[in-house]
Structures are given as C-alpha cells and as structure tokens.
Amino acid sequence: MPLVEEKLQNGYQEDTQSTRRTQTSDPTQSPPGPMTSTPKRAMSVKKKLQLTKKLKITLTKLEKKNKELDNLRKKIKRLEAKNSARLHQTQRKLADRRKVAQNRRHDMRRQIHTFLHRDDITTVINGKTGEIRRNGAIFRKRSLTDTLENLHKVFLSENPSMKISRSQFCKHRPLWIVSPKVKDRETCACKLHENFTYKVKKLHQLGLINCNKPADLVSLTVCDLSNIDCAYNRCNTCRDSMLPVVMDPATKNNIVRWNEWVTKTSPYSKKSSDGTTTEVEGKHTALEIKAASLQQLVEKTTNDLPRFKVHLFNIAHQFREIRQLKERLVEDEVVVHFDYSENYNCKWSKEIKDTHFGGGHKQVTLHTGVLYVSEGQPEAFATVSSSLKHDAVATWAHLDPVWQHIKSSHPTVKHVHLVSDGPTSQYRNKVSFYLASTVPFIKGFKSVTWNFTEASHGKGAPDGVGGALKNLADRLVAYGTDIPDAEALLHNLSEQSSVKLFKVTEEDIETWRLIATEPGKIRVREVSCFCKPACDCYTPKEVILREEKENEDSIGVGQWVLVKYDGCLYPGTPSAGPRVTTGGAGVPDLLRPLRGEWLLHGTIVGDEFEVETMESAGGNCFYTPATRIPGDKVWYFKQNILDLIPEPMPTTSSARHFSVAPEIWAKHK
C-alpha cells in the first residue's frame, strides 16, 4: 500500500509541474492551429483516489483469498493424511477379511469333499470305467447315491452352522464324483432294500402314505433312528408305532401289483462227464410281479418294517463307527479293511481265435485292502494267488503277509481292527473266528476286533484297489505286455503300481489248514463300538470256543443234562445229535441278533445237540408238560450244555414236580 500511494503521489506532482510550465510559457506564441492535436486532459485527483480505493479493496480481497487457499491446502493435507491412514486400515481389514474368507472357503471345500467321499453318500465305481485322468493324475470315480439337491439338504442338516447355497455346494463337487449312469448301474443291490422300496413306492403311488422313500417312512415310526432301542423295537415309546396309512374300507380289497425280487428253487438238467443227463435243483433269483389286495400289501409292508429299521440303523451305525475309528486312531492301532476282488482273467496282447474263444485263459485271485494308521496316508495292498479258493483258510493265508508287513513297517502297532463284508463262506464262520482269536496273539498283537458291514452294503476302498490293479493290467496288455498267469501279473504290477503286492501260493493256503488245536475266546455283539478297548456297549456276549473233551465224549441220547437258554437253567435229555452246522438257521438265540442280521464277530457254528427240556415252575422246580409243542426241542451248542446231571428227583408225592440236585443247581446258578 505505501508503494502504491507513493506512485500516485509522484504522478500527481509531475502533472502539477507540467501544468505550471504550460501556463508560464511564451505569451507571444500563437495558439495551435486547427490541424494541431489537443493534449490529453490530466486525470482528476478524485478519480485517482477512487481508483486507489478500488485497488486497495481488490488487494484486500486477494490477500483474503490467499489465506483461504492456504487454509484449504492445509485442510487438504490433513484430509489426505487422515484418508491415507484410514485407507491403510481399511486395506488391512480387507486383507484380514479376505484371508478369513479364503480359510472359510477352504474349510468348507474340505468338509464338502470329506462329505462326498463318505461310503453312504457315494459308492466306488469299480472296473475299467471307474478311472478318470486329469493332468496326468488318476482318480477313482465315485457315484452319487442321491441327487445333489438332496445331498445338499443332508449336508446342511449335519452342519447347521454352515451356510452354503446349492449352487456353491455343486461347484465344490470334485470332478471324480459323478452322477450315476446306466453303464455304472448297481449290480450288487441290496435285496431287502429293493423289495421294501418297491412296496413303499406302490403305497405312495396309491396315495396311502405321503412319502416315497423308505428312510422317510421309517423316520415317521421311530423317535430317533440313530437310537438302537428305537431301531430294534426296544423303545417303550415307539415300539408299537404303526405305518401312517390312511386306507378307504371300500378299496382295501382292490388288487394291486408291485415288483419283488424272489429266490426260487427250480429243477434243471445237468450233463455229466459220461454223457448222461440228470435233473438237479438250483436256486435262482429274478424280479417278479406280485399281486395281492391292498390290505395285504399294507400288512406285508408292516411286517417288513421292523427288520428294515434294524437294517437301516445297522448301515448308518457301522459306517459311522468305522469312520470315527479311522479318525481317532492312535499310534498303536491300525485298521485293516479288506475284501476279495473279482478274479482277474489273464490274457495275451495278441491271441489266436482258438485261444480267445476256447476258454484257455487262467484266472488269478486278488485279495485287496487298505491299511489305516494314525499318521501318514492310507496304504493299499493286495495279495495275488493262482489258487481260486476263497474259503476261510485261504483268507487267512492271504492275510498272513499283511500281518508281517504291519509288524515290520509299524512295529508300535499292538491293536488291530479288521473290517470286511460278511459272507459266511469267506469271513463270517467258525474257522475265521477261531483264527482271529489265536493268530494275531501269536504274531505279537494284544487285541483284535473284526467288524462286518451290513449285508449288501460293504463296498469300499478295497474294491477301488482291485479295480485300479485290473485296469493297470489291461493297459499293459493293450501296450503289448503278455499276462498269461499269476506270476506275470505280479511281476508287471510290481513294476508299475504303488500298491504293496504279496504272493500267496497253494502251499501257503494248505499250511493254514494245519493251524493249532486249541480254540480261544471271543466276544460278540450286534453292532460295532470303539469307545474304549473291550467296552461293554450294546451288551456283548462272551463265547468260549474251547470245548471240554470229556463233556463232548459223554453226551449221548437219553443222558440227562443241564442247559442254559436265555439266561435260565433247564434240565433235559438230548433226543438227537451231535450235528455240525454252517451258520444261519441253527444259531441259538443267545448269539442271534434281532431279525437274524449279523454285523460284528458273526455267528458261532459247530456241533449241536437237540435237547428236550422240562418246563420251569419257578426256581429249582420243573415239570414235564402233558403235551409237547415243536418249540420244546431246541438245538444247543455244546458250550451251552453246562453239565451232565443225574435224573431230577420228584419234590412232591404225586411226582408232578422235579428238582435238580441242590449242589449242581447251586454250582451253575
């Protein structure tokens, strides 16, 4: 401002001096002519002051704007610093959230994979079509047992804390989990399951029930299907539950038709080696169309319901217990899951017509399995043999190298859990039980359990091992390798496969037929449990395979004996025996689970005696009924014949009641 005022003041002084000089110039000078320009009139003082004032005002505004701009710059810097810190914090939070979300997605994907690999959710597709290759890796296909929509509901019901849409659930499905196809159809379906399903679907089709799935129908008749008392009709609340059927009396006699698998015995002609033809009877199973009234169909379904409840419970219980057993293994435990694979048909890479159609191909037995230990990956193994025997002795010959492998590779293992299906010809018989009660202890193990899956529901990892080996063998043949016998199969598979392979000869099998003479002791129960070693869950029964020689030699027809039936003592006399049973119909009630389904430790078979017992009148008092019914004579195993006794003495003068010798009664009571 002083500089501007100074300039204005100097300008004013200069103008004043110029005016004075003009006024004091020569008076004789003539005024300018008409063509001469007139000089500009000087700015007045007033205007100059006004201009000065305007300049001052403008300058003041500029200074004010500069201050505002400085404040804005400072504010922008503060906001930038604040936003930078907030942005950094937000980025850190987003990174943490992204990491948590990734971990959650990874855990969800892992849980879905584990869920889809369960044996009750998917089944292994065996055979040549059961493999899928991606990027050099080989995967074994598994077929879904239900639609992904229904499996998604099952997954959410088992994991209520997880929220995942059906599309995301389907997105996490592995590529080797496939929908079932016709070529992959089930050819080992459960007869009980299929027949009950046919009846349920027919009732649903007729509008008598509101569900078309057997599991849904069973859930309507029990409190809790996972409770063994409800499944085995021992629950006081639901034991008398009936099918929720609404039937019109006017239509109950209408004839309806449904499908059912039926096994029949029919004669057929068999040609002997000498050319003669004989008529023999054989069993065959076929799908037939059954016809009955609507009321009879409802009655049949009602009668089949208790057995099917047990069947359904056993399936889920066995799979769950075995799965949890694998998850909770400790260092000194091992699970051995094994099964016979379908025999491999040997072949050459190039064959002449006579060989190809002449039936000159040999077969090889493959006994496959998987070892599960507490640490590390499961180990697949297989035994190869030219012997086609699949009986109990052959089975233990195939298991012998597995015992040796466990002792050498896992020396800390002391407890072995065997898992298999339950055919009586291979696993579930007296020879296997005897060997299971002796051989593992000879090998140095402290305990062994044998767990059988439910009938017709035993597909598992061993079937996948067998399919992979046979697929590999067929690929080798396709590339020019000849596999004419068991030796060639073992040699070629050993070089190409990571499966642990063992050789079993005919001599090895025959050696096991000469194993020891003294049986051991086993405990049996209806279903599996692994809460602790030798637990008492589900009421196990102890069976001593050791039999007294003197008792065996002295039991005869007409000799008085004391037997134990359903926990009670009865005197009686053998009317027939001994006989040798092969399991099934002759098994006493002491060892038979409800509905005749065997799951764990199987049936005990051996010599039996038919004993005609007296009726109990309470305590040590018995009488002979006036009339006999067929149920009075029961076949007893020798271990249930407790003692040889003298003839019971009458306790009354009328000789209507009798008693066993007091010392014998006290001894066994």
Image (tube, rainbow, N blue to C red):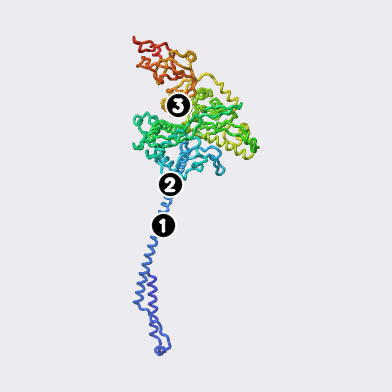
Total numbered labels: 3
* Residue 389 at x, y percent in the picture: 56, 27
Query: In the rendered image of this protein, does residue 449 appear above or below residue 101?
Result: above
* Residue 505 at x, y percent in the picture: 60, 27
Residue 259 or residue 171, whichever sits in front: 259
Going by the numbered disc 1, the residue's amino acid type is: Lys
Residue 10 or residue 374, whichever sits in front: 374
* Residue 12 at x, y percent in the picture: 38, 77
Going by the numbered disc 2, the residue's amino acid type is: Arg
Between marks 3 and 1, how big is the CA–CA gap? 73 Å
3 vs 2, front mark: 3
Residue 531 or residue 197, whichever sits in front: 197
User: Would residue 327 be visible to someone looking at this image?
Assistant: no
Label 1 belongs to which residue? Answer: 77
| Label 3 Cα crowd, 10 Å radius (few <14 / some 14-19 / many 20+) | few
The local secondary structure at tag 3 comes to loop
| Label 1 Cα crowd, 10 Å radius (few <14 / some 14-19 / many 20+) | few
3 vs 1, front mark: 3
Q: Along the polypeptide, which appears first: circle 3 or circle 2? A: 2
In the rendered structure, are the residues bearing label 2 and label 1 in contact, judged by CB atoms less than 8 Å apart? no
Query: In the rendered image of this protein, does residue 484 appear above or below residue 176?
Result: above
Residue drawn at x 54%, y 20% is 516
Looking at the figure, which quarter contains the N terminus? bottom left
Going by the numbered disc 3, the residue's amino acid type is: Pro
User: Position of 661 compared to 408: left or right?
Assistant: left
* Residue 377 at x, y percent in the picture: 52, 35
Q: Quadrant of residue 340?
A: top right
Query: In the rendered image of this protein, does residue 18 appear above or below residue 635?
Result: below
Label 3 belongs to which residue? Answer: 533
